[in-house]
Amino acid sequence: MNGNNPSLIHAIRGPVMLITVGVLFALNQMTDLTFGKTWPALLIVLGLLSLGEHTSGPKSGPPTSRRDPNFGGDQ
C-alpha cells in the first residue's frame, strides 16, 4: 500500500481531525491549557493534511501517447 496516495490522505482527514479535537479537549480537562489557546493546532493539522494531499498528487507533465496495437483499424 502506497502511503502517498492522495485518496488515502483524503480518507484519513476526518479521523485525524477527530483525534486532534479529542486530544485538545483532553488537554483542556487535564492541564492548564485551554481550548482557546490550543485551537490553532486544528489549523496546523488541517494544513499539513492539505499539503500532503497536494504534494502526493499525480505529477503534471506532458501527456504520454502510447498506441495500443490491439485497438484500432490499422491492421
Image: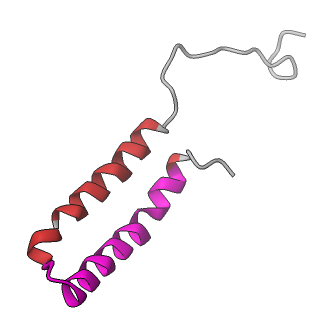
Instruction: Give me the residue at 49% from left, 62% from top.
Output: 11
Q: Is residue 48 above or below residue 19?
A: above
Comparing 72 with 38, the one in front is 38
Q: Is residue 74 left or right of residue 56?
A: right
The image position of residue 58, as x and y in percent, is: 52, 33
Question: Based on the displayed image, in which of its 4 quarters is residue 71 positioned?
Answer: top right
The image position of residue 35, as x and y in percent, is: 14, 77
Instruction: Give me the residue at 42% from left, 45% from top.
Output: 52
Give the colouring mode of the picture: secondary structure
Specify start and end residues of the magenta stretch as a single range.
7-34
Instruction: Give me the residue at 84% from left, 9% from top.
Output: 74
The image position of residue 38, as x and y in percent, is: 17, 69
Q: Does the magenta segment cover residue 23?
A: yes
Residue at the limit of the structure toward the bottom, as seen here? 29
Comparing 5 with 42, the one in front is 42
Question: Based on the displayed image, in which of its 4 quarters is residue 68 positioned?
Answer: top right
Instruction: Give me the residue at 43% from left, 71% from top.
Output: 15
Question: Based on the displayed image, in which of its 4 quarters is residue 41 positioned?
Answer: bottom left
